[in-house]
Every structure is written in structure tokens, then in C-alpha cells.
Amino acid sequence: MHFYPGFHGSEIKMSPILAAPIIKEPVTKPVVETEVLTSIDPGVLEDAHVYVHCYFKNNLDEMLIRVWRSTFLIDKASGARSELIHAENISYAPQWTIIPGKKTFSFLLIFSALPKDCKVFDLLEDIPQSGGFFVSGIKRNELDVYHVDIH
């Protein structure tokens, strides 16, 4: 065995093929703090999200669109609501997003997990005025990723 200067105790062997040193670090086991293990909430580890890709066909020259935070996925069987966690490529009310004319506009809504036994759900924008969107009877899939047309 040879020790290579500057590696402070790391074991060095010379490779017979490359004539270069091979560094072998000492094997150590990581220390796991028991306080950390007991402080992790198992519900957080199993938490999942539902991704809904929405498509809105704009037939006008220009249009404004937004989403309210009071948008939910509703399990048809139990009525349980999954909350909107995040929206991408669309503004939250009261702000507006401009949609260019005569184009299909897409945005992503991310929701908290649906109940495990949910088979069919609705997408509801529950707002205190007309114009909220509603998509009924979305069939659940294994990935919890969906593509819906908004009318």
C-alpha cells in the first residue's frame, strides 16, 4: 500500500493498467438522527397532486381570462373537494391574462390529492358571478394527469 500525499488518510493503490492512482475513500455509515425520523409526518410523504392541463379555444380577436382560488376538483361519489394549490400560465383573480385572438390557450392547474377511492370527479370554478368554468365527469386515471377543454 502507498499513501498519496495530500489525501490525508485516503487509501491509494496504483492502477497497473493506467499507471495512475486509484483513490479508495474510507467506508463510513451515515448517522441518522432519530429526532428527524420521528418528526416526519407520514401524511406528507404520501401526499400527491392532481395535474389538470386546461385548453380554452378563443374565437374572438382578444380575450381576458383568469382563475379564482375557489376552484376545486369534486369527487362525484363523496363530494370531497381537492383544493387548487398552484396555477401556471394564467392569472389569479382579480388579475387578468390576455389571450391572443383565434388561438387555443393552455394553462395548468395543480390540486391537492383526490380521495383514494375516487373514480370520477368534476372541475368547478366556484365564483360569485357568471362565467366560472365547469367540466363534469372526468374519469380518474393512475397518473392523476388530465387534459380538459374549457368552454
Image (tube, grey):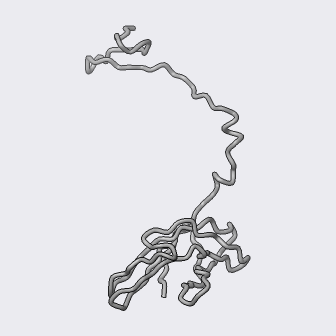
Q: Is residue 91 above or below residue 128?
A: above
Q: Residue furthest right?
A: 78
Q: Position of residue 74 (x, y in %)?
A: 65, 77
User: As drawn, is 57 to the left or to the right of 114?
Assistant: left
Q: Residue furthest left?
A: 18
Residue at the image point whose x is 71% and y is 77% from the top? 79
Tell me the quadrant of the picture where the N terminus can be found: top left
Residue at the image point whose x is 53% and y is 66% from the top? 86
In this figure, what is the number of numbered marks?
Answer: 0
Q: Residue furthest top?
A: 2
User: As drawn, is 87 to the left or to the right of 125?
Assistant: left
User: As drawn, is 82 to the left or to the right of 62?
Assistant: right
Instruction: Residue 124: name its quadrant.
Output: bottom right
**119 or 74: nearer the viewer:** 74
Residue at the image point whose x is 60% and y is 60% from the top? 48
Q: Position of residue 59 (x, y in %)?
A: 37, 91
Q: Position of residue 49 (x, y in %)?
A: 57, 63
Instruction: Residue 3: name its quadrant.
Output: top left
Q: Is residue 113 above or below residue 59?
A: above
Residue at the image point whose x is 44% and y is 80% from the top? 55
Q: Position of residue 114 (x, y in %)?
A: 64, 68
Instruction: Residue 78: name its quadrant.
Output: bottom right
